[in-house]
Amino acid sequence: MYIVFDIGGTKMRIAGSKDGKELSTPVIVDTPKDFSKFENLFKKAVDEISNGEKILAVAGGVPGTLDEAHEKLLVCKNLQGWINQPLHRTIADITKSFVFIENDTAMVGLGEAMDGAGKGFPIVAYITVSTGVGGSRVVDGKIDRTHFNFEPGYQIVDYNGEVSSLGDLVSGRAIAAKYGKHPAEITDPKVWNEVEKTFAVGVHNALLFWSPDAVIIGGSMVVKKVGISVDNVAKHVEKLLKAFPTVPVIKKAELADSGGLIGSLAYLRQKLSLKS
């Protein structure tokens, strides 16, 4: 039995796999802001999924910047109470198994590259816009090497004289603070057009640094009834891009809430050399 998890700022998703290929229905619980409450929640979910079966290995993603050993969080806006807590040791003690932890966006990006909208492209850039802005680069089916992790949401952009980090301009948290309402309640197309133009600047910059074959855009801010239109972002990027003769494929993510779990299982297969 293998366990995979996707810990976000609001929800935790935990699932199992008996063969390293298929995932069980995930257990979904609220992410506690207080790390001391994590152990019991995680153990309860793991016990329910494994049903007493031996756990061979665990892999999953967490939001924020991990230390070099990938054992604890160093920076995390949405989970301040988790910083410098013994995350790796806690999971290892619960599962009595090997544990691999990565940035959550990197895991989703891997999922999209292997089984989602980025499948078939050698170099995939994944960018997510939800509560915050994150991203990752996947090369030949593997998360690209970094010293810490990718943080495109922290890039500084200047749009219409407003200088700030990309995340502080286009994230769900930023939009809610600016307009005083949940982004899903904002129906004015002029608002979203400005958000799309600003976000396109960040995507354009990511293209210059990462030079991918495809850019996959996901997250809760990507248009459902209202929100960021990937097609509109692609049009704005095309107008901005002067450095390259062609614009990479820009697509909407396909795996929705399962991307992190699918990516974590793919990561586990790579680490353990399991057959896919």
Image: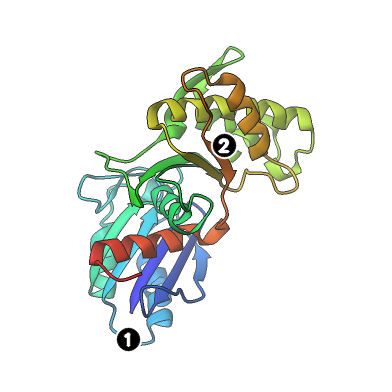
| Extreme residue in the top direction | 161
Residue 10 is labelled as none
Q: Quadrant of residue 209?
A: top left
Quadrant for the C terminus, please. Answer: bottom left
Left or right of 59: which side holds 24?
right
Query: Relative to 255, is 42 above or below?
Result: below
Left or right of 156: which side holds 93?
left
Q: Do tag 1 and tag 2 residues touch (Cβ < 8 Å)?
A: no
Query: Relative to 27, is 190 above or below?
Result: above
| Residue 72, image x, y percentages | 27, 51
| Residue 70, image x, y percentages | 25, 51
Q: How is the image coloured?
A: rainbow
Distance from label 1 to label 2 (Cα)? Answer: 41 Å
Disc 1 is placed on an element classified as loop
The residue singled out by tag 1 in the image is: 53
Disc 2 is placed on an element classified as loop
The residue singled out by tag 2 in the image is: 171
Residue at x 28%, y 70% (from the top left corner): 274
Residue at x 46%, y 29% (from the top left corner): 207
Q: Earlier in the sequence, mark 1 or mark 2?
A: 1
Q: Can residue 244 be seen in this snapshot?
A: yes
| Extreme residue in the front direction | 245
